[in-house]
Amino acid sequence: MDHPANPDFLADITGALHWWREAGVDCDFLDEPSEWLAVPDDEAGGERRGAPERRPPRTPVEAAAEAPPRLDPAALPPDLAAFAPWWLSEPLLDGGATAGRIAPQGDASAKLMVVVEEPEPEDRETLLTGPQGKLLDAVLSAFGTRREDVYLASVLPRHTPAPDWTAMQQLGLGQVLAHHIALAAPERLLIFGGSILPLIGHKSPQRPAVLRNFQQEEQAIPMLAAWGLPALMRQPRAKPVLWRAWLEWTAA
């Protein structure tokens, strides 16, 4: 065997390494597994320490204590007159913050309930006082009604940039909305916003407007679900689709 200092021997080794690299092998492999996460030997005692001890599974009590807060259905307002004060003051609705909340509006006897995702940034005491409100008024006028004749509500108590709808579902806002609808007891339900439907057990609409039924215990309330008002403002071609859906909905 040639000495390692022999140039021919070194050339052979270099050539072999290049061949393996060209073949796509650039790592050293062992048949026996190694303990990558092993902690080095203790410098003081010289004893080898194993991997960090795993945390034991949480008990049901610990899991419940660490779970995010959730609204208690039993604590929801008993009637529509009590809903607005509760909506403006319940801490859990918005992480304890109550400033900027907007109450629902309308007559308790309104036949049509309109639900939007959230108030507009411009809103202070009244829902939808900005561009979205102007669009809603135009839509309602085309439908032959007025804002004063409907019950108008939002899913979120105040304007919330980029809301986490999954967290809202976990909080229990879907149950709050279902309870709110039950208290208002409308004959028809008009929803603007694809993020609202999953809260009440439906998929988000892929089309600008879809017809559904909102199941309230044993009663089914006819429901027209449309894209949110901001989306309708950006997509003018969606408005004729909403208009045709309204005609089909009200003709039934």
Image (cartoon, rainbow, N blue to C red):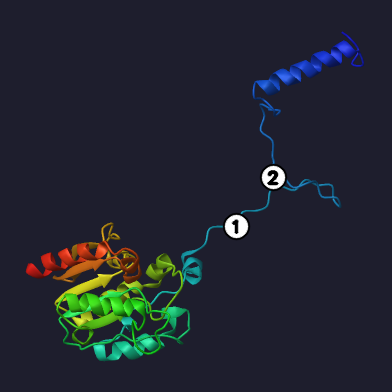
Of residues 156 and 57, the one nearer the viewer is 156
Q: Is residue 158 above or below residue 208?
A: below
- Locate residue 147: give its quadrant: bottom left
Q: Secondary structure at mark 2?
A: loop
70 on left or right of 182: right
Q: Which mark identifies residue 27?
A: none
Residue 21: x %, y % from top left: 69, 23
Q: Residue at x 69, y 41 (%)?
A: 36
Q: Which residue is mark 2?
A: 37
Q: Residue furthest top?
A: 1
Q: Residue at x 26, y 91 (%)?
A: 81
Residue 230: x %, y % from top left: 35, 70
Of residues 161 and 66, the one nearer the viewer is 161
Q: Residue furthest front?
A: 236
Q: Which mark identifies residue 55?
A: 1
52 on left or right of 142: right
Of residues 236 and 84, the one nearer the viewer is 236
Q: Is residue 65 above or below residue 22?
A: below
57 on left or right of 170: right
Residue 159: x %, y % from top left: 42, 78
Q: Disc 1 versus disc 2: distance between alpha carbons?
A: 16 Å
- Locate residue 226: give its quadrant: bottom left
Q: Secondary structure at mark 1?
A: loop
Sequence order check: which comes first, mark 1 or mark 2?
Answer: 2
Amino acid type at image mark 1: Arg
Amino acid type at image mark 2: Leu
Question: Is residue 154 in view from this perspective?
Answer: no
Q: Quadrant of the C terminus?
A: bottom left
Q: Residue furthest left?
A: 252
* Number of residues whose C-alpha sits closer than 10 Å to that of mark 2, classed few (under 14), some (14–19) or many (20 or more): few
Q: Quadrant of the N terminus?
A: top right
